[in-house]
Amino acid sequence: MRPDAGRVPARRPSPRSDRQAAVGTAVLCVAVAILGTIAAFAVPAGLPYDEPAHWANTLYLAQHHALPVVGDPGVTYEGQQAPVYYLVAALLVGLFGSGFVGFTVVRLFGVLGAVAITWLVSRILRRALPDRPAAVVTGTALVALNPMLIVMAASVQNDTWSLVAGFGAMLVTLLGPGRRPWLRGAAIGLLSVLAIMTKITAAPLVAGVIVVLLVRRRWRESLTAALLVALGGGWWVLRNLALYGDLTGQAGVDAAGFRFAAGATTPFALAREALTYLTLPDEYLRNVFAAPGVIDALVVLLGVMLVAGAIALATVGRRPLRGVPVALVVVVGAVSLAAWLAQVLLGWHVAFRTAYGALPLAALAFGSATLWFRGRRAPWILCALPVLLLLVLCGWTGLQLAAVGDRVMLEL
């Protein structure tokens, strides 16, 4: 008998609630596409943190047709990053040039990834919260209408598409063991390899997926996925060992003279950074503007909703925490957060966006705040409140960007 045989299948949502969630998701996908496109044109080139270094990797690949090595001329501290994103971006540069047009196309490629993330998070939440369309739309809105995630996606960076592949692996895992576990495991493994080879910070997300497969005794899927991850990412580890002497290439960054100051590690400072990277892009945009007290209050209110939703999920939510969708989201989120905290406490300068594998968990908690309300209309009324707050934050961010004086930060 298969390990999952005989277990009660996940309850399917009613057609009405599924339709409501689908319509809400479609609206949010259109919204993130519009807002992301605006950001791609409005944010000064080079203002997003690390964008110049990511762009340098892209140009190096486009011009030299070889992987960059930290320390070589024209290669910066991001030269040790995994290559998948830069290969695609370099192809776009080859087609559209390395000037403004090519740069903007690469940025818009990131916006497309943001739309994909919105859809994937919604699909994950619809499995975790069946017959709770307001909760699904509310949680998805935290990702789709998030100024930080929109600005990040609309810049040259490898985070967005790494998350697309990682969340894709999570969604395939939630499709169940099925009749072809080897094929399902191969799909999970290939998506996991793409996530890691786009950005190594996806490794905790992948580890969480494999842990859940093992706990559910889905042996063939976990074995196939783990084997593909080892083969698909092993060569990159060996390359780093040969070039830099360590697994990640960080030794090469240090040897090249790049230094980054470590941030504060008090609980308040860590909570502040996490909440900032879940809402506002001021730190990501080199702190050229700062949020006033009113905006800080709105961010704190969103944080309160996160906490209230987490409590609701554990208490009044109808679906138990041992359900596979909720368990997968919680495990992946916990492992991603733990990996970030471990690096920070070890003294490494690691931004919270490296823990974005926890975004489905944040969305699940945020959307679950609507579970405190019963009936058909009350949850949707509560849903409208955070959507309005997020739109206010988007508008405020847009005004700050319009006021940035220096529009030439990266020559194209």
Image (cartoon, grey):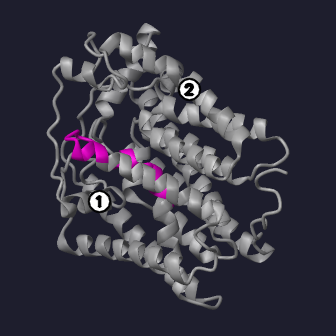
User: Which region shows up in magenta?
Assistant: 342-360
For disc 1, the marked residue is 276
Q: Quadrant of residue 69?
A: top left
Residue 260: give x, y in percent of width and height: 17, 35
Residue type at the position of mark 1: Thr
For disc 2, the marked residue is 230
SS for callout 1:
helix
Q: How many marks?
A: 2
Quadrant the C terminus occupies? top left
Up-down: is 210 above or below 272? above
Label 1: few (<14), some (14–19) or many (≥20) C-alpha neighbours in 10 Å? many
Identity of the residue drawn at 51% across and 76% down? 314
Residue 331: give x, y in percent of width and height: 51, 55
Q: Is residue 355 magenta?
A: yes
- Left/right of residue 249 with respect to residue 330 in the rendered view: left
Up-down: is 231 above or below 128? above
Up-down: is 323 above or below 250? below
SS for callout 2:
helix
Residue sitting nearer the eye, 380 or 213: 213
Up-down: is 148 above or below 55? below
Residue 79: give x, y in percent of width and height: 34, 21
- Left/right of residue 66 with respect to residue 8 in the rendered view: left
Task: Name the chief secondary structure element in magenta.
Answer: helix
Identity of the residue drawn at 14% across and 39% down? 261
Q: Quadrant of residue 187?
A: top right
Disc 2 or disc 1, which is closer to the eye? 2
> Is residue 78 visible in this depiction of the protein?
yes
Residue type at the position of mark 2: Ala
Residue 256: give x, y in percent of width and height: 20, 17
Residue sitting nearer the eye, 357 or 347: 347
Gap in angstroms between the C-alphas marked 2 and 1: 34 Å
